Image (cartoon, grey):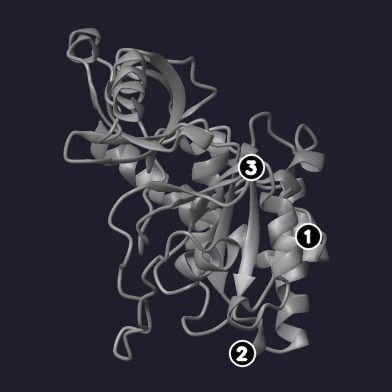
Amino acid sequence: MKTVRSFVRTVSFEGRNMQGKIIRGVGGFYYVDAGEEGIYECRAKGIFRKLGQKPLVGDDVTFEITCLPDMEGNITSLLPRRNELFRPAAANVDQALVLFALHSPDPNLMLLDRFLIAMDQQGVPSAILFNKEDLGCEEEKETLRGIYRDSGHELFFSSIGNGIGLDEVKAYLAGKTTLLAGPSGVGKSSLTNACQSNVHMETGEISRKLMRGKNTTRHAELIACGSGTYLCDTPGFTFLETRGIMKEELRHYYAEFAPCEGKCRFDGCVHVDEPDCRVKEAVEKGAISRVRYMNYTGIFRDLKEQEKHRY
């Protein structure tokens, strides 16, 4: 009788529509987290190809169960997306945490600014975390606080390996889907491991020759870290192209420039070569970080060069 009841229950569940979130996509299979019901291995129905749609990690979906014992199903629809990221390919991300190390490897602040711009460009608010603070000193931390003080991005310091600063970071992550961005070897996988115990992310060694981590994450993946809390771990990047931004628009991605807008001698001043520029004056007075300004002019010239080759 028990076997018959179990069989009837299984049959009644197959064909049932459920809702969940895609946490991983590999080789045409999508792994959908249905909460207490567990994780289902699903395929996307052919209608998505006809519509030119592709399910993404982070998508909220409906799916029908095709085999309950094996927890298999077919994705039947994508629920409306709050946002869609082009790099990495992910959807419904609430915020980003951009990780760099204080040392080993030393932080590349130009690359950090590129990450912040890429997140802002896609409408994703972001904070900065400098990991391995135990390898630095208070003076170095104060310097970084001064550089990013008026950038509009919250700043954290931690040493994930020994738990320093971890509570503050976890509070920032709670209840959100957070994209972890940054180069290899700075602690993204270590942070993921520290926030949950169900999935162990491989952590990379630091290459002695290149002083950067071996790329251990191969694809975007959501890791559940509690009710409604997900981390999106992504491949480490050593270079990030700033795409889709006109050089004249770049200044709007630097929050500390905002008080000077409209006060320069020339309308539409881009704060690079023009005379009587209030931003450059603010840099000379120390009101705007010289490091941030130099990063801005470097990215501006890169965009200018890209536009030259584009046309």
Q: Are marks 2 and 1 in contact (CB under 8 Å)?
A: no
* Residue 151 in the image: above or below residue 134: above
Question: Real-space Cα distance between discs 3 and 1?
Answer: 32 Å
Q: Mark 2 points at which residue?
A: 135
The N terminus - image quarter? top left
| Secondary element at tag 2 | helix
Q: How many marks?
A: 3
Q: Is residue 246 visible?
A: yes
| Horizontal arrangement in the rendering, residue 204 relative to residue 126 (left or right) | left
Amino acid at pointer 1: Arg
The C terminus - image quarter? top left
Query: Which numbered tag is attached to residue 149?
Result: 1
Report the residue at 33% width, 91% height from top. 208
| Horizontal arrangement in the rendering, residue 126 relative to residue 247 (left or right) | right
| Horizontal arrangement in the rendering, residue 280 relative to residue 9 (left or right) | right
The image quarter containing residue 284 is bottom right
Q: Nearer the viewer, residue 16 or 263?
A: 16
Where residue 205 appears, x then y in whole percent? 35, 82
Q: Residues within 10 Å of mark 2 (few under 14, many from 20)?
A: few
Q: Name the residue under label 3.
A: 227
Amino acid at pointer 3: Ser
Report the residue at 49% width, 15% height from top. 80
Q: Say whether disc 3 or disc 1 marks the residue closer to the N-terminus.
A: 1
